[in-house]
Amino acid sequence: MNRLLIISQDVIGRRMAGPGIRMWEIARVLASYMPVTLIAIKPIDLDPYPNIEFGYYDFTCAGALQPHLERAHTVLANGFVVQVHPELLDFQGKLIIDLYDPIVLESFEIFRHSPIADRERMFARDVESLCQALYRGDHFLCATERQRDLYIGGLLTLGRITPALIDADPLLRNLIDVVPFGVSDAPPQASGQPALRGVLDDLGPNHEIVLWSSGLWDWMDPQTLVKAMPQVLAAVPDARLVFLAGRHPGPVHEMVTPQQTRQLAAELGLLGHGIHFYDEWIPYERRADFLLEAAVMVSLHREHLETRYAAVRSRVLDHLWVGKPTVLSAGDTAAELIVAHGAGETVPIGDVNAVASALIRLLVDRQRRAAQGANAVALGQRLRWSQVVQPLLRMIEMPDSVTRKFVRLTPSVADVQVNANSPMQEEVALMPTYDGVQTSSTLQQVRNDAIKVQEQMWRLNQLPSEHPVWRWLQQKFWLPLMSPQRDYNAAVLRSMYTLAEQMDHTIGLLFDVAARLEQRAQALEQRAQALEQRAQELALRVTNLEDGMQDHNHRQVSEIHQIGQQIRDFADQLAGLEETATQMLAHIGGVPALPPKQE
């Protein structure tokens, strides 16, 4: 029988927060269908529950999950667990990752006041863990459609979404689907024990309680609510604001918001006189006592990515459970849900006057408050845990690796080693052509069609019949005979998945090598063209050099001739001067002049 292991990264027990509550409620629903082992980071101090086995593990010790993993066929775990327990990535069964809590975005706010170097390290660690979880998981859960879009982007980047997967699952609901935070199936019932009235000073039976039921986290905005209270008290003197401000039952980073909120209330003179803090984390089974005493609920947040992609918070869903209207900051999925169903009021982020006006309207107008409370109850009925868990149940019942069979393990181009003796461009051109893409696509389509048929038929479901004799025959003979056949069919289907994954891997590798070869051939061709162009340039330079040398030689010969002529002309001029000088001397001295030379 399929044994499900549910791993919580938080405390599960009489006092627990959202992550623990989610895993506990999911376990309770699924225990009606299969044996469940539920483990948390501390021993679970709850009463025994049918078909659920409790356990715990050391969250800080890598490898502590291994004994639990060895007994499980299917595992549901929060994605954050991967960061500390890498053994989860090596689990051989079906792994379903719950991504309802966007840890990476939440850490931006939790560690906002830490040194930037520490924040960068934590961010890198969180992103690495998220990528590992997205690559390993067989199926994924998230809490809203907005979250689903975010994670589909991550899966696409990691190559988890392939054409073959889209062909088999066009909307990817088998890979990742929405399992929101739910509402308890059982209606709220007060235990009769005192909760707030008569316990906190200045809080009597006639006061109208405005309740902040969630934690005072650093990404929330209780300060705007505190600033609005003077206006509210002026209009409704009997109003009282109460923060459920107990310390988180698990190991969490210290928040600055609780102290800042108290200090602001004290500065306004309202601490203990209009604004109160209940300093214990209330038991999960007693939360109805506190919620039912309130008139109006409030949940405000600041503007940042965590709230945009956050789940509808567990405490807001508790407001629907007890039928109380809620005042919410606009901009997140919870606000859109409340507005669409008329279950409360939304206000602009950080708008003190808008918060005061919304509270005054609901506190003064009882009819409006009752109508929104009724709408809250109706909306809560649609979000019961037994209903919202159905996509998870569908994933658990799917054959193993129904999504991973389509994963194409594609190595990067740098990882593909090509032999230095690969064919040159001319040889490649002479190779016979082969339409590998078209043929591979056809074969994959035939294979996927065969797998689909096997997926539809492997269970050998019994034929529907209302006749008691036929039902008895089915129980007596059909089911015992078909059970071994179902096991065999499941084994065959798993083999088909393995072969399909191996085929996709091989085809992907071949295509990548072919692409690398083509890139190399193109690079060689470009190199040859560059060399040819270089040779042409050199030849032109040589020709130009030869022409220049010839011109230079001609100029030198011409200049030599000109110099020779100039020397001869100079010699003639010297001879003429010599003759003139001789004649002048003869004339002066009475010496007869010599006759001129005859040439």
Image: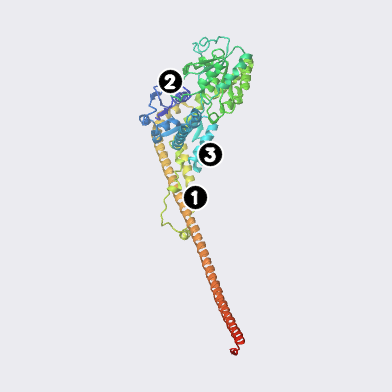
Q: Nearer the viewer, residue 237 or 429?
A: 237
Name the quadrant containing residue 91. Answer: top left
Cα separation, mark 2 vs mark 3, equals 40 Å
Residue highlighted by disc 1: 437
Mark 2 or 3, closer to the camera: 2
Residue type of the residue flagged with mark 2: Gly
Which mark sits nearer the N-terminus, 1 or 3? 3
Q: Secondary structure at mark 2?
A: loop
Q: Which residue is mark 2?
A: 13
Depth check, mark 1 against mark 2: the one in front is 2
Residue named by callout 3: 170
Q: Earlier in the sequence, mark 2 or mark 3?
A: 2
CA distance for labels 1 and 2: 56 Å
Q: The disc labelled 3 sits on which kind of residue?
A: Pro
Residue 552 percent location from the top left of the image? 54, 71
Mark 3: secondary structure: loop
